[in-house]
Image (cartoon, grey):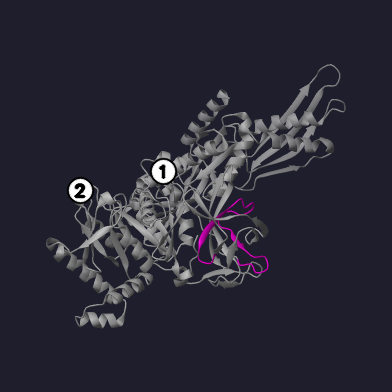
Amino acid sequence: MKEFGIQQLRNVGLISHGGAGKTTLTEAMLFNSGATDRLGRVDDGSSVIDYDPDEIKRKITLNTTLAPCQWRGNKINVVDTPGYADFVGDVKGSLRVVDGAIVLVCAVSGVEVQTEKVWHYADKYNLPRLVFVNKLERENANFFKALQQIQEQLSGKAVALNIPLGSEDNFKGIIDLVNMQALIYDNEKGKGFTTAEIPAELRGEAEEYREKLIEAIAETDDELVMKYLEGESFTPEEINAGLRAGTLAHDIVPVLCGSALANMGLEPLLDTVVACLPSPGDVDAVVGSDPDTEEEVEVELSKDGPLAALVFKTMADPFVGKLTYFRVYSGVFNSDSQVYNVSKKKMERVGQLFIPRGKEQVAVRHISAGDIGAVARLQETSTGDTIGERDRPILLAPIEFPRPSYSVALFAKSKGDEDKLGTGLGRLMEEDPTLTVAQNTETRELILSGMGDVHLDVTLERLKRKFGVEVDTKEPKIPFRETIRKAVKVEGRHKKQTGGHGQYGHVYIEMEPLAEGEGFVFEESIFGGAVPRQYIPAVEKGIREAMEEGILAGYPVVDFKVNLYDGSYHSVDSSEMAFKIAAIQAFRKAMEEAQPVLLEPIMNLEVLVPDAYMGDVIGDLNSKRGRILGMEPQDGEQLVKAQAPLTELSKYAIDLRSLTQGRGSFEMSFDHYEEVPARTAENIIVQAQKEREGD
C-alpha cells in the first residue's frame, strides 16, 4: 500500500443514530474511491464493513470498523461506528483517535436521539465535523426540514454546501452552491455525474442558500468581511480557504446531501472531507505523561520521535486470536519487531501489521505517525493501552468508557462448560471494555454486566458462536441481608447419648445489635472455666457458620455482637463439634427472639437528563422508593442525584431509556444497607421460602 505524508491523512469518524445509513455510506465511499469494485449492501449481507455474522443477522453495525480509501492523492481512514445506544463504548473509543467526524442525518427521520448524543461526544473531543443528509431518495425525505433541525438541535453554525435537485422518486442530483452548478447522476452508470446549469425554477432557492454560505465564510476572516460588506464577489480560492478555516475553527459546520444507497452526492462529500476536515498535523498535539515521574509530555507528531500508539479497539477471534486496532501518534510502528506496553510495563512481540478494510487485511511493513492500523496476537495488550518504547516511554491517557448499567446472571447449560464459559467471557471482555463479569459470593451467581439488553444478547450470541458455550440467564438475585434490633440472652444445649462416648456442649450467649457496617464481633467473658478454653473457638466457628443463613429468608446475618458468658461441659462427652452445634442452636434461638429484620442494598444514582424529562424521571424514582438528594445543571442538562433500593433498579437502564426516549443516562454505585419496609419484606420472605422448597 502506498505511503502517505501526515498532511495527506484524514482520520474521520462516521457517527449517527442507528439506521441513518453509516455503513451504506462507507460502502459508497469505498466504491467511489476505487477501494472496492462493487457497492456492498447491508440488506443482502454483501457489505464489506458489516461482515460479522451477528451484524449480518441483525442488519445493524455492532463493531467499530476501519475502512481506508484514497481520494485525490489523500488517504481517508473512515472509522464506521455503531449507531445503537448499547454500543456507545465503541463510539467513544473511536472518537478518541480520529481528528474529525462526519455526522449522518436521515432526510426522513431528521435529527434523532443518538445523533444528539454522539454530537455531544464529538464536542467533548473538540472534533471539527461536517453533516451529510442521507436517504433523499426515500418517501417523505425533506432536506430543508432536516437542515432546520440540524441548525436548531445540533449547531447554529450549520450551513448548506449543496441542496437537492428533486426529492423522493424524483431525486436526481444536487446543486453545488460553491460553484453554482447542478450535478446530475445517472443511476445506470453506477457512479459519476454530469454538470449542468441550475434549473430556472430552482435558481432563486440556490442563490438564497449560497448567500447564507457566503455570509458564513465572510465571518471567518476580517478581509473577507470587508469584501462582503462592500458587495465584492469571493474567488473560488477564497471560498475554499474560508470554508476550511471556518470548519477547523468550529465556526462553520458544512452540510451536504445525497443518497448513499443510490450512490449520489458522494464525490462532493469526499472532496469536502479532504478540503475541510483536518489532517493529523492540523490538530493540537496530544499530551501524554512520563510513566515514571508522571510529568506531562507533549507528543510531537513526527516519524522521528519515540513510538507512541493508543489501542482503541480489540477484536477477539478463537482462531486468529486478538486483533488490536491502534492509532500512531508518534514514531513508526514496525512489523516483526518488539514493542513496550507502557500501560502494563511489559514487552510485546509484534508479527505482521495490517491495514484492515472490513474483514480484509492488507499487510504492511510499518505504520507511521498519524495513521491507523492493526496487529494480531498481542498477548498482554488490551483496549486503552499505550504501545511505545522501553527506553523512551510515553503514557497516553486511557479511553474513558461508560460504566455498565444492566446485568444478568449466567448459568452454563452444560456442566462441563464452566471453564469454557470463564475463558470465553474473558476474551469478550478484552474485546469490549464496557462488559464486566463478576462472581457474587453472596448469591453464588456469575453476573455479566453491560450497556443494555441488546448489548448482552449480542455478547451471549458471540459466546455461543465463537467459543461454543450456551448459557441460561436470569435476573440477578438481590444480595439481601438480615440483622437484629433487640439484645437477648439465650441458652444452647446439645446432648446426645449413644453407645460409647456421648456428645455434650452447653453455652449461654448474649446477642446484641451493632451499628450498620460494624459486621460481626465475638467476645467471651467466661469465668471459672465454665467452658474450657479449647472449646471457645468452636463456639465462634458455630456462630460464624450459622450467620451465613438467617431465619427470615436465608440471607447472611450482619451487624451484631455475640458474647459467650457461661456454659457447662462434660469431662468425657464434650467435644469441639458438640460446642459448635450448641452455638448454632443458641444463635437460631437468639435470632427468633431478637426482632430480626431484612436489609436491602441502597444505591447511589446519578441520572443525567434533559430538562423536559425531569418530572417523569423524578416521579419514576419516587415510585421506586427513591429519595431525591439534589439536582444540578450540567452541560445543558440536569443531573439528578438520588438513592433507591437495588430491588427496584434491576431494569432501570431499560426504564430510563423508555422514559426519556433514549436521552437519559445514569451511573449507579452501592452506598449502604437499609431495613426493608414490612410489606415488601413479607413478599421477599415468601418468595425465598418458595425457592428453598423448590431446591
The magenta stretch spans which residues? 368-394
Q: Bin the neighbour count of mark 1 within 10 Å (Cα to Cα): few under 14, some 14-19, many 20 and up.
A: some
Residue 251, relative to residue 260: is it above or below? below
Q: Earlier in the sequence, mark 1 or mark 2?
A: 2
Q: Is residue 261 above or below residue 291?
A: above
Element carrying mark 1? helix
Q: Which SS type dominates the magenta stretch?
A: loop
Q: Secondary structure at mark 2?
A: helix
Q: Is residue 385 above or below residue 677?
A: below
The residue labelled by disc 1 is 654
Q: Do labels 1 and 2 touch, CB within 8 Å?
A: no
Q: Can residue 357 be found in the magenta stretch?
A: no
> Residue drawn at (74%, 36%), measured in percent from left and top?
541
Of residues 469 and 565, the one drawn nearer to the viewer in this rendering:
469
Percent position of residue 396, x then y = 57, 64
User: Residue 342 sits in which quadrant?
Assistant: bottom right
Q: Which residue is mark 2?
A: 169
Given the image, on which type of amino acid does mark 1 rest?
Ile
Q: Is residue 612 something one can see in this rendering?
A: yes
On the image, the x and y values in percent for residue 187 come to: 26, 50
Taking the image as shown, residue 173 lies to the left or right of residue 501, namely: left
Labelled disc at residue 517: none
Q: Position of residue 158 (x, y in %)?
A: 29, 65
Residue 443 seen in render: no
| Amino acid marked by disc 2 | Asp
| Left or right placement of residue 352 versus residue 211 in this view | right
Quadrant of the rendered structure where residue 569 is?
A: top right
Image position, residue 444 (x, y; %): 61, 36
